[in-house]
Image (cartoon, helix red, strand yellow):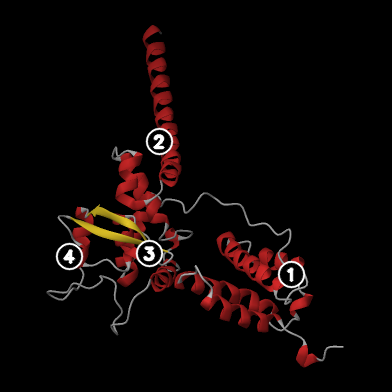
Amino acid sequence: MATESEIKTFGMVCDQFLVWIMTAPNLVDSTRAQYRRNLEKARRAWGSLPAKGLRPVHVQELMDVLVATPGAANAVLGVLQAMSKWGVKRDHFEHSITLGITAYPSKGGHRPWTPAQIQAAEQKLTGLARRGYFLERYTGQRGSDVVRLGPSFIDEGGYRITQIKNGKSVGEIWVPIEPALVAEIATWEIPPGYIGPYLRQANGKKYGAKLLSEHFKEARELIPELTGTTLHGLRATRVVELRQRGYTTLQIQDLVGMSAKMVDHYCRFADRKANGQAALIELAERRELAEHRKNRKS
């Protein structure tokens, strides 16, 4: 019979799993960081429990706790699925701890911001959260690219950006610099000759996408109009705006660096909304015309 010291807890298995992913092939640093961050939520729940006592019901209970943030819940489930597969092979778990557990349905990505939300952001955001907002709003880039942007990226009236996703380069694009962004940058305190990132910490340390997200969340708490918004949703906002200006899917794909499938997804939503609004206007005009004719006859 195993003694208490021989019983391997879930926390102990977490430690071994994290050691493994640090040297696992085909994993980039950003993925490893996501694994560590999401695994901590499970460790807080079950860290002291015997690993071999865990069942899918425990995972489902954690998913239920995180139901208000389905994206976060799905991220935790993803790392637990990977850990479970790894752990069963090494006799840390008696069976899959995620068997039968399903992710929450996708809502089709981050939703575009509304005009009211955009107005509130541009009126009330301050500091680095404001800088990050304007850079994402008018370039449509991911946070991992926005935090690197600076004067050195400027190329003939636009930014030449080598996009980074999950720590890997996914191609180069050219993004025009909008007049609204030029006007905003002119208000920022940038030393003469400075060519580093627009987003930088006061102590000179690197300013990453995670820190930008944290600063935005803190600022969002003080602005009721921004409830439910995400910085990543500004990519969708940019796509919709470009479509409304008459750009094709291929052109938007080149300007934003987004798959044609996602461009079409966001544009279909915007196009349906615009078509619905146009139909209401046409219906109102027809009613007005019918009423006018009726009055003339009478």
Circle 2: element type: helix
**Gap between marks 3 and 1 measured at Cα:** 34 Å
Locate residue 279 relative to residue 256 in the image: left or right: right
Disc 1 from disc 2: Cα separation: 45 Å
From the viewer's perspective, is the residue at label 3 or at label 2 nearer?
3
Q: 201 left or right of 178?
A: right
**SS assignment at label 3:** helix
Closer to the eye: label 3 or 4: 3
Q: Nearer the viewer, mark 4 or mark 1?
A: 1
Q: Is residue 57 left or right of residue 69?
A: right
Amino acid at dot 4: Ala
Label 3–label 2 contact, CB within 8 A: no
Which residue has dot 4 on it?
A: 186
Cα distance in 3D space between marks 3 and 4: 21 Å
Amino acid on which disc 3 is placed:
Gly
Q: Residue 21 at what x, y percent from top left?
A: 55, 75
Q: Nearer the viewer, residue 233 or 23?
A: 23
Badge 2 amino acid: Ala
Please tell me which of labels 2 and 4 falls first in the chain. 4
Q: Choose between 193 and 295: the one closer to the eye.
A: 193
Mark 3 vs 1, N-terminal side: 1
161 lies above or below 210: above
Q: Which residue is mark 3?
A: 143
The x and y percentages for residue 296 are 36, 10
Q: Position of residue 158 (x, y in %)?
A: 20, 55
In depth, the one of 128 and 91 nearer the eye is 91
**Sequence-first tag of 3 and 2:** 3
| Residue 58: mark | 1
Structural distance between the alpha carbons of marks 3 and 2: 29 Å
